[in-house]
Amino acid sequence: MELHRSQRKSSTATTSSTTLPLYRSAPPLEVRLEEFELYAIDRLRVLKGISDGLSRGKKSEEMEKLVRGLLNAHMKHPQASEAVNKDIISHFVLRLVYCRTEDLRKWFLSMETMLFRHRFLSESPESQKQVFSELGLSYKAISYAEFEAVKDKLVQVARLIGQPVPSADAIYYKVPWEEVPELVAGRRVLLHKGYAYIAIYQVVSLVATQFRSYLSKTLSLTNRKWTSTIREQEKDRLTPIVEALCTSYLGPDYSQPTEYADISIKDLEQIAKSSFPLCMRHLFDKLKEDHHLKHGGRMQLGLFLKGVGLKLDDALTFWRAEFSQRVGVERFDKEYAYSIRHNYGKEGKRVDYSPYSCQKIISSSPGVGDHHGCPYRHFSEDNLRAALGKMGVNNQKIEDILDKVRNRHYQLACTLTFESVHGSSCDAGINHPNQYFIDSQKVLQSKNNSTA
Amino acid sequence: MVHEAADMVIDGNEQKPKNIVSNGFDANYLKIYYGKLFPFADFFKWMSYGNDGKHPGSDHSYVGRREFSFTLDNDIYLRFQSFNSLSEMESSTKEKCPFKIDIGPVYSVDPAKRHAYAGANVFTPVERELVFDIDMTDYDDVRYCCSGADVCLDCWPLMTAAIKVIDTTLRDDFGFNHILWVFSGRRGVHCWVCDGKARRLSNEQRAAIADYFHLYQGNENSRKKISLTGPVLHPFLARSYIEVLKDSFESKLLCSQKIFSTEERYEKILDMIHDESITSELRGRWQDNRRPSKNDVNLVRWEQLKNMLQSGKHKSQGMRRHVEEIVFSFTYPRLDLEVTKHMNHLLKAPFCVHPKTGRICVPIDPERCDEFDPTTVPTVAQLLEELNAADMEVDSETDWDRTSLGESIRFFRSAFLQPLLKSCKEEIESSYNAKVQQSKNPLSW
């Protein structure tokens, strides 16, 4: 892919008969700098839309509709051939943008795979077959005798996942389970001796997994190229665009506290009441009450507090003051202090970890004794009602919030809570607990200023 | 031989009180344990996975890229230790005398030299056993005999059930063969799946296995207990229920944990049934039931509850499902998922001494896990005594052979290490042949 500042020689991509590219190699195209950025932004809108849909817990069919809508809205181009180019160019630009950290790669990988998956599903059987063979997948359907041998269990799985009971001519493939991890994770397949029996309608998982693992490998390669050459070579041209692209649309990762950087321990109690989102306030209260939190809770609250601006020394003092009441100072220093220093990048791999985003918190699965997770998603209605009452949300608002929760709009529920507690609107919506905190501090400060 | 211990006690008189933890655990005992009993040779063989042989296909850098982590007295952590040979590992361990040895992943480069490889991507984990960590504290809401760090023979069947469910599933469903179960020294068990393909799983595949096992358990915030959704159970859950959980619940835990014995306890179970008419009828019977009965009250009440839920009147699927949900809530394995999901989690090595209990982290035979008794696992103090008593006898190949650790090490060798090394050799052989074949083929380059 060559980049040009403005004038453009048109050249067409070598299009294959399918409209679903596998992005195996960068196209031999010349791209104008403006298009470079504009195409990337359009694709980013699609990926961001998918990400929002997932964090609202949308089901597969709803996602399909959503993806179709997003593609229509952002990826269309008057010229058909140009639409294909736009697809490919924007993908390669975002690869550059999202290759640079583990978190970015993870996000991009999930969203691109989700996009690919839904596009694959809407393809014709012919072109699905073509994709299948382009990916080098060749599996034979199991024989009738083999089908009969496991039929009862296949029927059980089909009923479990709400699919019609397989008949004698049903087609099943036997593949190594490692190639369909998502079907395994959801217990949507029968496993036997290392193989998964997948039905014809589950082939998309195989394809998506292949796509994902290929993309994952190339992202690491891109990252190596980026750090070794591209960043320096392009420091006056592409680098600024690339670096701006991920933050302007996904928001910052809040790993470095900025505006309200000096929070001292004695203020914590106060700001927890005034400015913590419910998930963090719940953890904070539980910590004060039990003088203990399990691993998931320590991570979620600990990294949030780091983002809020609690310095490492203060963090150690804070956690020690609570935990020592339950386990003693010595055990705290032995067993827990390490992981706090670890969060601040002072131990182990020395990575400065980012606070958890809403999406990550919503998709966690708190178990017995855990208090982390998203209260809007993980609390029972009664408990949520009580918690919101304690925050001072009035009954009318509570009903509105519960309504959002029932429709699985957890972040919208949190946004409504913010608005109710602060008496001011929050148009951007809540995407990150640290964003909730910063927005809250802004509101409170402007209120202070106006009364002063 | 244990005279040395006596000498050390005298020499180290001043620091001794600090080092005594309980049950006779003592830093000086540890020194002798590493000096005479810890099975370094077998341990190193295991970690080498056949790459210490002469075969041209073996990777001699393999074992040296493994991270070990030592926890010393006073909680000094030494991470990223690595050893290129048995003697290196042995002398370093004896010198540092770690309270705990953890095993990490095999990295792309020697972890001790990681700083020499600048740039973030060079130093990454490339292999790691698939591991499981089950801890009794996660069962505190379903056991009434002990809590926290304590375990007894009344709650240990929870661990036994977990071992059976997971071991069978790893073998029958996932097709793994080389599985090592280890007592964690106090209140739980660890599982190491060591097949080549298990060691090379990606994080995503590890997470898939963890999720395959995971049942949503709920917590005090959600009030929901286990919910088994869908019209039928997945074949794996159905098998676990029929082969393990039902029996474990009915013939062990029901009575040993006295699950229905008090109002508070049976209310917890009635809470899981969403049918007022059933719960109020049962509650009525149980509250009035003052007549002493020959039969155990827990058995009687469980039968009553089952009859109610499974009787013709309430024959709907949902009501019968409640019986299974109750059994799953009280018996289904609870895993520390994070340990399984990530390649770079550290896990305590087998044959370590637990610094609180002094007990050795011995392997557990999954075939005979019913017989395993955590309260009689040898402690380091006991082993040293045995060693001392046996000192006069002759003709023993090694020191550990004269102690009760011998049985554990022999089991480790015969049931785990030998079959594992055999298949490692086959794997090295066949991948080497494939490579040779490929280089001979003129059409590929």
Image (cartoon, helix red, strand yellow):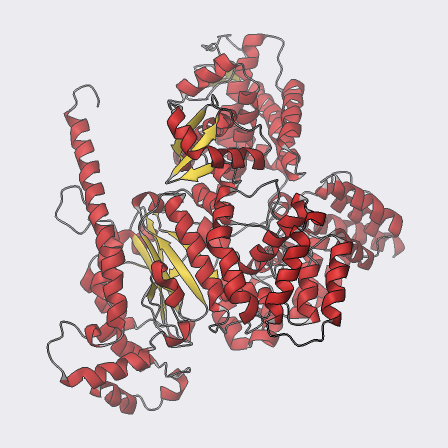
Which quadrant of the rendered structure holds the N terminus of chain B?
A: bottom left
**Left or right: B372, with A111 as reference point:** left
Which quadrant of the rendered structure holds the C terminus of chain B?
A: top left
Q: Is residue B188 above or below residue B293?
A: above
- Nearest to the observer: residue B246 or residue B209: B246
Q: Position of residue A395 (x, y in %)?
A: 87, 51
Q: Residue at x 51, y 40 (%)?
A: A187
Q: Is residue B74 above or below residue B251?
A: below
**Left or right: B154, with A50 as reference point:** left
- Nearest to the observer: residue B115 or residue B211: B211
**Left or right: A314, with A348 as reference point:** right
- Nearest to the observer: residue B178 or residue A100: B178
Q: Position of residue B139 (x, y in %)?
A: 55, 64
- Nearest to the observer: residue A314 or residue A141: A141
**Left or right: A329, with B10 as reference point:** right
Q: Is residue B169 above or below residue A132?
A: below
> Residue A424: in sight, yes or no?
no
Location of residue B258 (image quadrant): bottom right
Q: Is residue A186 above or below residue A418?
A: above
